[in-house]
Amino acid sequence: MKALLIDLDGTLVRETEELDEIVMTKILKKYHIKKSIEFNGYNLDQYFNLLIKDKKLAKKIKKEFLESYHKLLIKTKLQINPEIVNVLIKNKGQRLGLVTSNSKKITNLILNKIGMINLFEVVITGEDVKNHKPHPEPYLKALQLMNLSSSDCLVFEDSAIGVKAALDAGIKCKLIGD
C-alpha cells in the first residue's frame, strides 16, 4: 500500500454530518420540503436536484444552506474521527489524499480547524471534478495527481455512495461506521 485516500464528512470528521443534518432539516422545514432521501454522500447540487424540481428555488435554498452551515461550522468544535486517528498511526509515513464532495472553502475551513491543512498531498473537492460521487471521477483524479494506480491505494469512506465511487475506480475500500 502506497497511499490512503480518505473521505472528509463522516469519515475524517464526524461532526460535520451532524451539522449537515441540523441545517438541512431546518431549511427543508422552512420551505415545506419533504426529506425523502438522506443527504449523506451527496453533494448539495445532486441532493437538491433529487428533492426540488424548481431550479430557482433549489439555488436559493443551496445559498441559504451554505451560509447557515458556514456560520455553524465556525462555532463548532471538530475532532478527527478516532478510527481514522488509529489508521493514521498504524500507517505512519503513508502518502495521503483527501477526496470530498464539499467545496474548497468548507474543506479548507474544516482542515484548518482540525490542524490537518498541510497533511494531505492531494485534496480533491467537489469543485475539482465534473462528476461527483458515486461516479469514480473524484478518486480517479486523486490517483492521477498522485501518480498512483488503483492497486496502490486504500480508501476510507462512510457512505454507500462513496464506497461505490471508490470501488468503481478500482480501489479497495474500507467502510468506516458509527
Image (tube, rainbow, N blue to C red):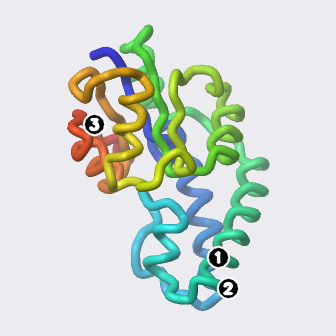
Q: Considering the image in quadrants, where does the N terminus appear?
A: top left
User: What label sits on residue 118 in the rendered view?
Assistant: none
Q: Which residue is mark 3?
A: 174
Asked which quadrant contains residue 118, the reply is: top right
Compare residues 113 and 129 and report the one nearer the observer.
129
Q: Are marks 1 and 3 in contact (CB under 8 Å)?
A: no
Give SS at disc 2: helix
Marks 3 and 2, Cα distance to the nearest angstrom? 37 Å
- Circle nearer the N terminus (1, 2): 2
Mark 1 or mark 3: name the one nearer the start of the chain: 1
The residue nearer to you, when weighing 84 against 65, is 65
Q: Which residue is mark 2?
A: 30
Q: Residues within 10 Å of mark 3 (few under 14, many from 20)?
A: some
**Helix, strand, or loop for circle 1?**
helix
Q: Residue furthest top?
A: 93
- Rendered residue at 54%/24% (across/down): 120
User: Which residue is at 62% across, 66% downward?
Assistant: 22
From where the camera sits, is residue 50 visible?
A: yes
